[in-house]
Amino acid sequence: MTIDYSIDVNPADSLARISRWIEKLPSGARDLASQTIANSVVNYMRMYEDYAYVSRASAYPNAPAGPGWFSDKQRRYVMAAIRRGEIQIPYARTMTLQAGWQVRSEGNGNYKISNIARYAQYVQGDGTQSRHEAMVGWKTVSQKIDDNQNRIMADARNAVRAAIRRLARELGETYG
């Protein structure tokens, strides 16, 4: 079963400062800027935080089945999976979350960013991130966008400028 955890990247909805800038652009430049923003956001989402160990017991000290455990069934499953070798201790990053980020065009300059990793929402989701992942240091989608908003805008601005320069060269004009 694949769960598609998605966020819409439409600057008019989520990136107010960038949105005001994009609204001033002609439609072709607006489309290019939106695509660049979507790709830029995906690139920032793919950057993993530094690894920090936090035990589940410290993240969930008052869990119903004892620190770190929400049920006896969960504890039995995890212990059996460790014995079978399905869960490795110490944990090695698989990079599945990183590889799961993708951009899809929805037409009319709108792009959807999604992650196909079935657990993405618990690691980086706004309002769905687990306490453990927050304590480990994972940033949510909104936090990543907020932290990188200036760089995202610079990427879009540079893409639009490069396109204008190419167009000017094609027309035999000089531009900046």
Image: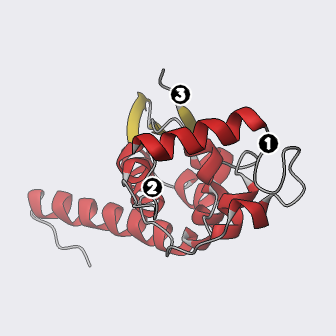
Give how far across and how far down residue 152 sits, in percent.
Answer: 47, 66
Instruction: Answer with the quarter of the image where residue 28 lies.
Output: top left
Reading the image, the residue beneath label 3 is 3
Q: CA distance from mark 2 to mark 1?
A: 40 Å
Report the side of 77 relative to 48 (left or right).
Answer: right
Query: Between 28 and 120, which is closer to the camera in this rendering?
Result: 120
Report the side of 47 relative to 20 (left or right).
Answer: left
Q: Residue at x 65, y 59 (%)?
A: 133
| Mark number, residue 70 | 1
Q: Earlier in the sequence, mark 2 or mark 1?
A: 2
Q: How many marks?
A: 3
Q: Residue at x 65, y 64 (%)?
A: 143
Q: Earlier in the sequence, mark 3 or mark 1?
A: 3
Q: Disc 2 marks which amino acid? A: Ile
Q: Disc 3 marks which amino acid? A: Ile
Mark 3: secondary structure:
loop
Query: Between 85 and 104, which is closer to the camera in this rendering?
Result: 85
Mark 2: secondary structure:
helix
Instruction: Answer with the quarter of the image where residue 48 lies.
Output: bottom left
Q: Mark 2 against mark 1, which lies toward the viewer?
A: 1
Reading the image, the residue beneath label 2 is 37
Query: Which quarter shows the C terminus?
Result: bottom left
Give how far across and how far down residue 67 sits, in percent.
Answer: 81, 57
Question: How crowded is the residue under tag 2: few (<14 C-alpha within 10 Å), some, or many (20+)?
Answer: many
Mark 1: secondary structure:
loop
| Mark number, residue 161 | none
